[in-house]
Amino acid sequence: MTDDRDFHVRAVAEGGVLGGGGRGKVDGLAKITGRSVFVDDLVLPRMVYAKVLRSPHAHAKILSIDASEALAMPGVLKVMTGEDCTARYGAIPVAQDETALALGKVRYIGEPVVCVAAVDEETARDACRRVRVVYEPLDAILSIDDALSADKPFIHEWARKPSNILRKVDQEYGDVDAAFAASDLVLEGTYDYPGSTHVPLETHAALAVPHADGRLTLWSSTQNPHYMHRTIARVLGMRPGDVRVIKPDIGAGYGGKCDTFCTDVCSAWLARALDRPVKFVFEREEVFYAHRGRHRTKMWLKMGMTKEGRVTGIDFKAWAEGGAYASYGVVTSFYLGVFMTMPYKVENYRFQSHRVYTNHPPCGPKRGHGAIQPRFALELHLDRMCEALGLDPVQVRLDNLIEAGHETVNGLLVPSIALSECIERVVQASDYRAKKGSLPPGRGIGLACSAYMCGALHAVYDNDLPHSGVQLKCDRSGRVTIFSGTADCGQGSNHMLAVFVAERLGIDPTDCTVVEADTDLTPVDLGSYSSRVTFMAGNAALQAADRLRSQIASALAAKFKVPVESLVFAGREVRGAWRPIPWLEAVDIAEGHHGTLGSVGSYKPPKIGSRLKRTSVGPSPAYSFTAQVAEVTVDQVSGVVTVDKMWAAHDLGRVLHREIAEGQIEGCVYMGVGEALLEEQAYRKDGVHMTPSILEYRIPTVYDTPEIQVLLVESHDPGGPFGAKEAGEGPQLSTVPAIGNALHDAIGRWLTNPPYTPEKVWKAIKGR
Amino acid sequence: MLPFPKFSYEAPGTLDELFTLASVSGSRIVAGGTDLLPSLKHRLFQDTLLISLRRLRELRGVTIEGGALVIGANTTLRDVARDDRVAAGWPALRDACRTIATSTIQAMGTLGGNVMLDTRCLYYNQPDGWRASIGGCLKADGSVCHVAPNGAGCYAAHSADTVPALWLYGAILRFGSERGIREVALADLYGTDGRTWLGNARDEVLLAIVVPKAPAGSVVHRKLRARGAIDYGMLLTAVHRRPDGSGAAVVSALGPRPVFVEAERVEDLAAAAHKAATPMRTHAYGVGWRKHMVRVEVERALAGS
Ligand SMILES: Cc1cc2nc3c(=O)[nH]c(=O)nc-3n(C[C@H](O)[C@H](O)[C@H](O)COP(=O)(O)OP(=O)(O)OC[C@H]3O[C@@H](n4cnc5c(N)ncnc54)[C@H](O)[C@@H]3O)c2cc1C
Ligand code: SF4
């Protein structure tokens, strides 16, 4: 760790802000002093409240809805049903299958059916209970097998070609069968990764405000204001320019707020219908139905290896249980396979996936979207093969690593990778080699690696426009305002923007104001998903900052008669003229010289990788890499697993702010520990969610969180802003398989179906 | 946010007022409110009058009377756990207070509220809309039990952490009502149906928990839970290792009434508890494993005694 600290000291000594150790986030003080404003904090004159009635059936026709009793209640203003807003929408243009409220039929228990607006939440809620809905129950599809069966009704019978398979992907690269024939060991295995959900602390919330001129403002707790902007305009039949979407401070998302929800559409529709502001905030239970979490995925993996440990080929099948709507499921069907060709070189690869519909709450993107499940299978499988061949799991991983400049067989070009350093550092820090196989009974150590993306090369809707835009305003006050359409969800992306701009202009991040996520004020950014913000918005911010700096530099060069190139921006001054020019004066001179100052920057990913057309979902301008080691203790009598410590080394390209990067990586490990030991989005066999509360759906408490040692590794990506990549999702991929491999070391059993509950582990030990 | 149903609220200043209010039908006592308020939001009770104990100083605090500990029903779990006399003479009670929920809830929740805690079940402690989707259950708004459809009633689990230890300490509960004061052994309070598990009359308010001088030998509390905090117990265990080599155990979270077993040889206690315990599907964790854990928990509690 010391080398990174040294780097930071160096950076600070040079007057730069990179590294940033010890500096608070630009929005940190507001957060910890309770000044941040969330949707539920917003109160407007004449504001009313919305609540929904949800389906008690997993699959049923809606025969009738009688709201007369509810409408007669004092304080009830409006009742909205699916018929009021029939335009179908969805995250991905090719799979738009949702309406804000169920239309004609319900597809999962907890699906919103009727929305009531009333003068207060209590009245709206009571009124919902008085709406009489008559259903005709249908045969429900409650498992992957049901969905694949020919004898079941279709969940989306209205589609042009109805099917309970949303998407099937088939891909083959190289000659897998020949590769297996030439292998010393070919091993098959099955894996079953559970579904889980995000549990953001702030529930989904929206406040829609109609304006006198017919325009509409929607405040929403969302990760993707831009996509929501498009969706709301289309669904309400409005011109995009007449809709303004604002994301205020939000209490995290982790992928759970990438879609447009009934909170958004219903509040917007009701606000227009009533000509009053409408607020709609989910109860905790409702977040479990809105879901969009991890797909439960069953997997079959076959892999070939030479006796020296070279991976020869992979044959992989995945069946993802997606719930009742598509959400980002089409993308999931690709992500399940696309990253299997890294970080280990695989020249022969066959992949098939099915993403199916079932009558459960819809799945979608959760931190490490689609890549978590196959990574778990691959990393366990690798250790199993090493065991069978008597090979060292560390050496086998190192020997198979791809190198910078490698293009995978499925067309992913990897500009930078420092995974060997990550592996060496976690192995050394954890003393893995000495401990593996030699800890006392019940204790074990495990290693796993992973690769992830830094944003997608393609937007979810096809276009040739920038993925990210940043606009800067600067005036004689010295303050620089950064306008950006990005959506900080607490991860610190606002701070990153300030770091980029401040570093380029030689000022401090606290000299910058970030105005974000307001579609009237800020340039388009595609949103907080696929770990794209630092990379893409960062590049846009750098371009804008460079342009502003050029304006200031040219004005100073003219005034002080020095070449532009001799000017250095650092420490809140510009040096290189006969005297240092304080920042404030420099801006003053520039404003006098050019008139009002301002600049824009944008980023569009380069079209890299020669085989791009083969997979349009998956390619990214850069990839991050992680190695993790887990040490566990298993209580052999009870089956209780304790993760004693995790070591996480992550190649994030470049450290821009140490604490934020470490926080992201710790957060990833934390969520991984939850998925490994505790969490499961579990349903009863009739489709009832068994634990829709944060008492019974158990995320780890501080007592359940192991000590985490984070090791930051820099690979200086050529396309990343200052060489940076990502740190917000990739590090979660290694956690669960590292724990799975450690469990095997501890009890000699391969447990292929997390979460590792005491009961499961106890049974595994008994069966030994 | 989950809204409250409408209710009215009284905070009587004297015991007489308290007893009068408690006799009103549709009234319910609120102490710390940490169990009651979430349950109201889940629409588990129809009561419309909440009677707060907060103004009654006599219901708060720990005193020693003739070697016995007298704890006002409205004493917070934190105050009980921090009391040096409790720690010195009745350490298992202190330990039990400290395994409840979280430190913030311990600062609000009371010992009386814990003793009177509602029984719990995966099918019952859910919001109203959820329960409606399964048609309710015997304990609330329904006519079937989802845990044991062919069973004899409701099996919702007694889940109060302090009760196993209080039981082995021989605690006596002091109730008051318009009819006067009445004392009941804690061990006699709980029945076998999760709907009617409390033996006191509806209008009887718990005033104090009297814990006699601790018996010879040692009493140890253990809790099996999924996480290091917040969670209710999957098993709550207290054991008493007596000087004569015999022992007793109370294991709870198995059904409405905690299971009490004794053994002449303390070595046989775990097997006896294991035999007597029948975990039900009231929890998310499987019954086979929980049954196995009864033995383990008793053994481990004894090892710590
Ligand atoms: C997240 C969470 C986790 C929890 N975990 C645990 C746990 O692990 N273990 C555990 O035991 N409890 C747990 N609890 C429940 C609760 O916090 C404790 O049991 C607490 O001791 C209850 O006390 P209270 O004063 O808040 O009771 P209240 O909520 O005020 O009352 C509980 C019940 O007792 C009745 N009551 C209270 N006082 C009297 C009285 N003097 N006379 C007659 N009736 C009375 C009330 O009418 C009500 O029915 C948890 C609660 C929450 C919210
Ligand atoms: S045990 Fe049966 S009746 Fe009792 S709460 Fe649970 S489901 Fe309801």
Image (cartoon, rainbow, N blue to C red):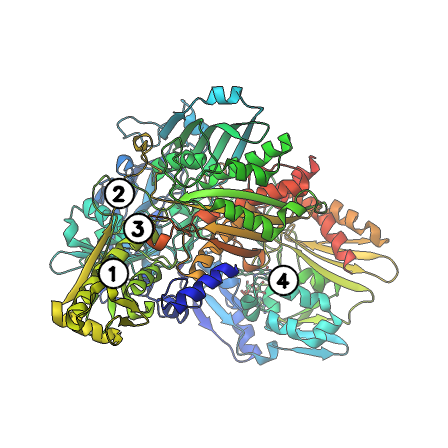
Q: Which mark is residue B99?
A: 4
> Along the line of sight, which residue is nearer the eye, A560 or A730?
A560
Q: Count of labels shown?
A: 4
Q: Position of residue A734 (x, y in %)?
A: 51, 45
Q: Which mark is residue A545?
A: 1
Label 2 SS = helix
Q: Earlier in the sequence, mark 2 or mark 1?
A: 2
- Mark 4 belongs to which subunit? B
Q: Position of residue B16 (x, y in %)?
A: 56, 78
Quarter of the image for residue A281 reads bottom left
For discs 2 and 4, the disc positioned in front in the rendered view? 4
Measured Cα–Cα span from mark 2 to mark 1: 47 Å
- Mark 3 belongs to which subunit? A
For discs 3 and 1, the disc positioned in front in the rendered view? 1
Residue marked by disc 3: A536
Measured Cα–Cα span from mark 2 to mark 3: 38 Å
